[in-house]
Image (cartoon, rainbow, N blue to C red):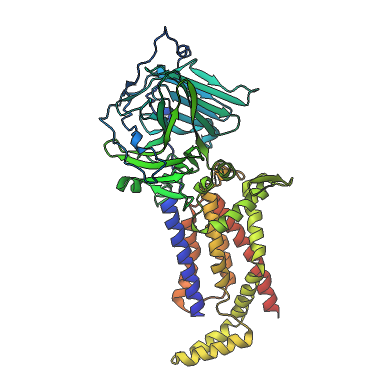
């Protein structure tokens, strides 16, 4: 009996510790920055045309615009991978920091059915992206979540350009691109939208920087079209980078008595490991330098990510830079040098993703990118749980990346969690039944066990022998009550990761006061019901003979209730449903054993 209690208490302590540790390290939610009150340094975009492209008589930009916005982090062409070498070269560091804010006249606004973004003509960088289908908060459905932005509160932008002998970007400055208009909108009858920026070099070569948007897609196709209208060979290397400062994740949370930050950092693909985390502390300590075939680099935060996916047919250098004075982290790729013959045309191509961490979409974009939905060390359990949840909620099932709709779905994630709990309970039904029968028999013979302890309290060996005889006679397994708990611990922890990491459950409502299953119950009703159900379940178990153990078990529902006050409502719903099903099963078995 003492062994059983010790194992139960150990199991509970381990689960509690792992839950707190995992949440502390990776997850949580917190009040997001109120973007409506932040003063943006870009201003609004004017509605007039910015000028004709390649207009000889117009105000054509200089070869390279001054480095007015502090973009002193341009990589060196020496960093581009060479065909004869797999090693990455060192990046040339930036020059002085000069960072006046961008002017409104430089910004181009683009709107699709799911994205709204701003492009700065100085450098052609994406300086703001809003996700129209993802509200910032449940109570502000018309205010979209801002993923990328350049404001007084945060710097998180996507940059790209060409370096090298004929490149547009250098440590001295970057080009100011021209555009035919200041606003672009994907109309209802269009499937695709091209946004072209134009630039003519002093040599006479013309370059089009094209952003291609598709309806319903967060993937932006990105091309530099080089028209070499000269008699000389044109050479340049494409780079793309994500620059972010050390500000907090807008999706993190400090709710509760334990600060619980989300994972915020980089990730990249390599041939030997498809998913490599690169935390901000890693980037501060040591710069990344690796050369890979194909791959991607990404900045990850809770539920969302941004990623550069260069041409998979080429070899690229992946690197990171930490700018201590600006507290900025840069994660970039550099492609090989491209050569364009005289009087011909060439294309330097890459893709940029900025949006939610949806596994099927990310899997289709590039190998390993779906692993940014990080379910931790129990991913092999979390993945099937997530697939079942999606099936129960929507009636859809994904097989090898292909979606199939079977026509069944409850349409509510809370009900799907309840049904999932029922399925898990059915899977462990026989194991739980054996445990409850053992506990019911132990409850029945509790007076006899107490008599043996009193009779042989001075002889521990004799006491143990008599108890074992009693166990054998009554067909009691003293460890039977521990096994279901130990077996279900991994399932519980795996579900915890699914509820916190899956963007599909972000702001998913249940009923009544619970409008977001990924957040804690605002009125603490579910945790209190869970605590009450746990207390009632403890009443069905035999009382431990040891007074200390009895007190610990008595206070266990209270301790768990306190912990669960700040857990996601979806996780508490699972535990409450599991307790209610366990109570029903245990009560039936206990009554049956007692009637025998």
Residue 86 rendering spot, x and y as whole percentages: 40, 46
Q: Is residue 378 left or right of residue 242?
A: right
Residue 565 rendering spot, x and y as whole percentages: 48, 53
Residue with the most extreme right position:
407
Q: Residue at x 34, y 21 (%)?
A: 64
Q: Of residues 153 and 476, which is closer to you in this image? A: 153
Q: Is residue 24 left or right of residue 423?
A: left
- Tell me, yes or no, if residue 522 can be seen here: no
Residue 492 rendering spot, x and y as whole percentages: 55, 59
Q: Residue at x 37, y 24 (%)?
A: 41
Quarter of the image where one finds residue 404: top right
Q: Quadrant of the C terminus?
A: bottom right
Q: Of residues 526 and 86, which is closer to you in this image? A: 86
- Tell me, yes or no, if residue 487 can be seen here: yes
Q: Residue at x 54, y 68 (%)?
A: 486
In this picture, is 350 found above or below 40? Answer: below
């Amino acid at each position: 009996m003492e062994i059983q209690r010790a194992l139960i208490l150990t199991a509970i302590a381990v689960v509690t510790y792992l839950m707190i540790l995992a949440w502390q390290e990776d997850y949580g939610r917190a009040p997001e920055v109120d973007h409506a009150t932040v003063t943006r340094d870009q201003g609004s975009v004017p509605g007039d045309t910015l000028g004709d492209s390649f207009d000889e008589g117009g105000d054509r930009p200089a070869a390279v615009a001054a480095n007015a916005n502090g973009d002193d982090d341009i990589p060196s062409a020496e960093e581009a991978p060479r065909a004869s070498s797999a090693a990455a070269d060192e990046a040339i560091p930036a020059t002085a920091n000069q960072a006046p804010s961008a002017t409104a006249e430089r910004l181009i606004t683009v709107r699709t059915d799911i994205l709204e973004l701003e492009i700065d003509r100085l450098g052609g960088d994406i300086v703001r992206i809003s996700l129209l289908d993802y509200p910032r908060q449940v109570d502000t459905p018309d205010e979209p979540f801002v993923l990328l932005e350049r404001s007084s509160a945060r710097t998180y932008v996507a940059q790209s350009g060409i370096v090298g002998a004929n490149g547009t970007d250098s440590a001295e400055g970057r080009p100011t691109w021209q555009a035919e208009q200041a606003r672009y909108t994907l109309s209802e009858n269009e499937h695709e939208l091209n946004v072209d920026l134009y630039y003519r070099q002093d040599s006479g070569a013309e370059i089009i920087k094209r952003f291609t948007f598709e309806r319903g897609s967060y993937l932006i196709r990105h091309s530099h079209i080089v028209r070499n209208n000269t008699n000389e060979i044109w050479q340049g290397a494409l780079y793309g980078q994500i620059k972010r400062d050390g500000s907090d994740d807008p999706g993190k949370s400090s709710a509760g008595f334990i600060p619980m930050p989300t994972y915020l950092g980089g990730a990249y693909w390599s041939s030997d490991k498809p998913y490599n985390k690169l935390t901000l502390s890693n980037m501060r300590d040591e710069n990344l330098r690796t050369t890979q075939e194909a791959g991607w680099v990404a900045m990850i935060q809770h539920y969302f990510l941004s990623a550069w996916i260069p041409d998979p047919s080429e070899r690229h250098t992946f690197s990171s830079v930490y700018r201590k004075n600006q507290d900025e982290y840069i994660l970039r790729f550099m492609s090989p040098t491209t050569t364009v013959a005289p009087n011909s045309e060439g294309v330097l191509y890459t893709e940029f993703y900025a949006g939610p961490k949806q596994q099927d979409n990310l899997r289709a974009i590039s190998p390993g990118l779906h692993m940014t939905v990080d379910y931790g060390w129990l991913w092999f359990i979390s993945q099937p749980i997530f697939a079942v949840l999606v099936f129960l909620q929507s009636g859809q099932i994904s097989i090898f990346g292909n979606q199939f709709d079977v026509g069944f779905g409850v349409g509510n994630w809370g009900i799907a969690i309840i049904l999932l709990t029922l399925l898990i309970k059915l899977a462990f039904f026989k194991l739980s039944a054996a445990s409850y029968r053992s506990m019911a028999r132990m409850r029945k013979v509790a007076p006899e066990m107490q008599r043996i302890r009193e009779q042989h309290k001075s002889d521990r060996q004799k006491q143990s022998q008599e108890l074992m005889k009693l166990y054998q006679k009554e067909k009691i397994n003293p460890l039977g009550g521990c096994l279901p708990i130990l077996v279900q611990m991994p399932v519980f922890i795996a579900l915890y990761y699914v509820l916190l990491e899956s963007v599909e459950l972000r702001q998913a409502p249940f009923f009544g006061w619970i409008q977001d299953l990924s957040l804690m119950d605002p009125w603490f009703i579910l945790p209190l019901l869970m605590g009450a159900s746990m207390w009632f379940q403890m009443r069905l178990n035999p009382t431990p003979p040891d007074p200390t153990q009895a007190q610990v078990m008595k206070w266990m529902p209270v301790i768990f209730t306190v912990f669960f006050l700040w857990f996601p409502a979806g996780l508490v719903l699972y535990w409450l449903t599991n307790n209610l099903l366990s109570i029903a099963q245990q009560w039936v078995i206990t009554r049956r054993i007692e009637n025998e």
